[in-house]
Amino acid sequence: MKLFTVKTLVKPLLIALSIISINVFCQTPSPDSTSIKQSTVINNVKGYTYLNSGELIEFSSIVFENGKVVATGANLLKSYPDAQVIDGQGKTMLPGLVDGHGHFLGLGFNLLQVDVRDISSKQKTAFKVAQYAKQNPELNWIKGRGWNQVLWPSKKFPTAKDLDEYVVDRPVVLSRVDGHAVWLNSKAMVLAGITRNTISPDGGEIVKDSTGEPTGILIDNAENLVWEKVPKQTDDERLVAFNKVNQHLLSLGITSVHDAGIDHDSYHFLQDQVKADNFKVRVYGMLAATDPKLVDMLKHGYINDVNDMLSIRSVKIYGDGALGSRGAAMLSPYHDDPKNMGLLLTKPERLRTLFKTIFDYDFQINIHAIGDRANRIALDEFEFAFNSRPKAQTLRNRIEHAQVINLDDIPRFKTLNVLPSMQPTHATSDKNMAQDRIGKERLKGAYAWQTFLKQGSKVIAGSDFPVELANPFFGLHAAVTRQGRDNQPESGWIKEESLTIEQAFKAFTLDAAYGGHQDKILGGLEQGKWADFILIDQDIFNIDVQDIWKTKVVETWVAGKKQH
């Protein structure tokens, strides 16, 4: 893609535009000479940004004041001789990256638990849990996340007995990497009241052995049986997690996150943190449709603070489970489990009620759908709702993950103006098991990023952290190469669906901001937008694509202030 350079602006025009920008976007009086002196210029950078017009430009200098961008171009110091000047030392500058789907506080808590990601056997996983339990004797519950049986020699679910060999004195609950299954020890099963007579709830499964005994694995809605027994986090614990995740994301160059599923307690906690000016990373929140106080939250209307650190105007609905645990709802049985078609976490009749309720308050709907059946049901419900409420079609509604889709349904995203919110690292994580789960034919509509772009859909990119690692450069790398960080498979997995680096960059910046109704204020570095940007150690547009994931963030700025 050809890159264009913004021409240097003459001083009179630039000052006039600066005044317009401040009046319109900052809602403050026009700046006098004193406020102009407070401008900051960063020179000598290799900058890239998308404009709202869709044009990708380069720049070598940026001016910002009062937290917002005044201009990008070349040699802008000439127009701002009294500004504070910073030498960018030739580093690459990008707008702060936007993660279009993550779990903000979930990642914070995850950083405080035992991490069992990428361990090659159930025995080694259980041993790490035992070490963590020994190092943390004050914990009444041992919690962790990240196990993935697909990486183990047997590729089979573990059992409570496997954990009991290492930890028996305290309950252990370990979330699968995708968050759609948990692995318990016997102590946790006893506390949860799970026996051979316990019936699996709707949208969930208590996995049992051939004799009918529970194995210690709970899938999707069945997880609630144990989570109801785990003590709720206190606000003090939330604050620790909140501070932890803020700093972690800043270190990765993420300045804005779409938080997929905020419960009532977190809803109030996050608003308290805004009032206390504790936010470092912007959060676009989705209310959890499963929360019993959903309507109470909807009645309060949109939440948006004056500094745009917290915005809540959408709802996350849970359609089905995940592919790895065979909980994704499929139109036909799993290729490797002919009796299983997955799980619907929310029944279609409940979906219809939810859609009406949410649209009654003009909130955006973002529905989790991974399997082709779940995606079809979601599209059907959008179509039904739009027939009686056409205005709802303008809310930039989304399907979160849009992972396996029947080829007949992909064009409906464009027709219905439904946005696919997709996570590139899901493809590279799933590549070793996806064909086993659904067969080769259904892969034609799976992880189909390029197909969506070609039909004119905007792709909102994210990571789904802590399901995947939050590092956005891992996502950019996966989107462009369709490879893992080991550069495998050599030619890329389903390579025809890969993105160019320009397309991937747009999906993690301007288009992700669009998916949160924030493209006028975030996602790029142009006049009037917040001065959220990062400096990185290599030019991702001019390196071997296999090295994109190695990018390191040198500095992260939010609203014109260096935060990392």
Image (spheres, rainbow, N blue to C red):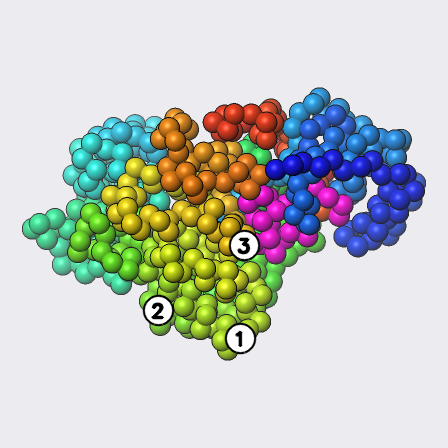
518 inside magenta stretch = yes
Name the foreground residue: 346 vs 504.
504
Q: Quadrant of residue 66?
A: top right
Marks 2 and 1, the one that precedes in the sequence: 2
Q: Are marks 3 and 1 in contact (CB under 8 Å)?
A: no
Q: Is residue 131 above or below residue 222?
A: above
For label 3, the residue is 456
- Which residue does the image show at 39% across and 34% down from the upper left? 492
For residue 389, which numbered disc appears in the image? 1
Q: Quadrant of the N terminus?
A: top right
Marks 3 and 1, the one that precedes in the sequence: 1
For label 2, the residue is 348
Q: Which residue is situated farthest in the bottom direction here?
A: 388
Residues under labels 3 and 1: Cα distance? 24 Å
- Characterize the local packing of mark 1: few (<14), some (14-19) or many (20 or more) Cα atoms within 10 angstroms: some
Q: Are marks 2 and 3 in contact (CB under 8 Å)?
A: no
Report the magenta residues as a range.
505-528
Which three-letter amino acid code belongs to the residue tagged 1? Arg
Q: Is residue 196 above or below residue 450?
A: below
- Left or right: residue 529 compared with residue 36: left
Q: Which numbered disc, 3 or 1, marks the residue closer to the eye?
A: 3
Which three-letter amino acid code belongs to the residue tagged 2? Pro
Report if residue 42 is visible in the image. no
